[in-house]
Image (tube, rainbow, N blue to C red):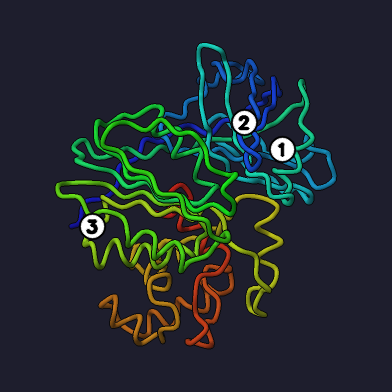
Amino acid sequence: MAAQRAYTTHPLVLRRVTVRRVHEVTPRMRRVVLGGDDLAAFTRDGTAHPAFAAPGFDDHIKLILASDGDVRAALPAQLPHGIEWTPAEHRLTRDYTPRRVDHRAGELHLDFVVHGEGPAEAWSASAREGDELWFVGPKSSLRLPERLDWILLIGDETALPAIGRFLDERTVDAPAHVLVTVSDDAARQELALRDGDTITWVVAEPGDAAALDAAVRALPSPAGEGFAWAAAESRALLPVRRYLQRERKLPKDRVNITGYWHREEAAAPEAQGTADAAAQGPAEIPSPLPWLVARAALQLGLVDAVADAPGLSAEALAARLGVPGPGIGVLLPLLAAYGVVVGARQPAARRHGPAGAELDHHHHRQEYT
């Protein structure tokens, strides 16, 4: 059996913090520094909760916002051992990577790409000292292999907080080869590079798969045991995944590909309704039957196969995975019903749907594996 990536899990806790200060890192990145008693161990409604912990460089927390401004009504319920995402019509959630966690100062730093759209960016633009923000997470933290001769860090502007945090807080003594695509040279940041590191900045439109693929192929291929980490627009990462795993032959436990966001497209008829549902909370496949279907598709490798080779028929997917064709034929319509794939009835158009893009993220994937 192939080695699997290792994770440390954390209890899910709903926390409240307030804005301490805001400043512009670059014309394309705004940093909001947050603090509050909930970052330390605290007790709420008689239940004790541990201090906030986010040890991984690519950890993410889920910010809770509300389209009508009533955030309190949008909050999930805190249970003694987790979170219940109770129905909330106006709830909006967005995942963000902590840029820095300063336990001594009791502060959490979050960086927001300034692109003029989206509820989280709008919140950061209006954030003032004392404003509150509620969040949940992280759910888990990626643990890097103990032995590394090198590490590749690949991403677009949304990956800069994770890349910057890794370079600041390195837990492994290995040269880092960094590639970042930005929409404008003004998005470049000063990063904590060391001797032996390399960095490549590429100006490209957000989500430009061809530009990202070409830039990744131009990176050095160092000898020894390494690790490749990549985060960007979900579909732009598909050729990167294929290149690293098929051509570079990196084992699965040496690659972590994370879809940080996905470009909005007009929903196919079979996927109507999934986008609205995803906007109100975390992408979750309801239990029990659909949850089991998603779990089966992940364990079979069907979700990855659709990502790696879009447009395959059910028979071709079955042959690729080495499983009986009728079973795949049953799974595909069910996966389409919940937005994991689209094009279930049109093989040439088959690809990831909104929920499938979310399942590219290892934090979401752990819910089903």
In space, the residues marked 1 and 3 are separated at their CA atoms by 41 Å
Q: How crowded is mark 3: few (under 14 residues within 10 Å), some or many (20 or more)?
A: some
Q: How crowded is mark 1: few (under 14 residues within 10 Å), some or many (20 or more)?
A: many
Q: Can residue 367 be seen in this view?
A: no
Q: Which mark is residue 75?
A: 1
Point 70% across, 52% down: residue? 280
Q: Residue 41 carries which label?
A: none
Q: Where is residue 253 in the image (x, y as percent from the top left)?
A: 26, 50
Earlier residue among tags 2 and 1: 2
| Residue type, numbered disc 2 | Leu
The mark lying in front, picked from 1 and 3, is: 3
Q: Residue 14 carries which label?
A: 2
Left or right: where does residue 34 sit relative to residue 256?
right
Residue 295's quadrant in the figure?
bottom left
| Residue type, numbered disc 3 | Leu
CB of mark 2 within 8 Å of CB of mark 1? yes
Q: Locate the N terminus by quadrant.
A: bottom left
Q: How crowded is mark 2: few (under 14 residues within 10 Å), some or many (20 or more)?
A: many
| Residue holding disc 3 | 250
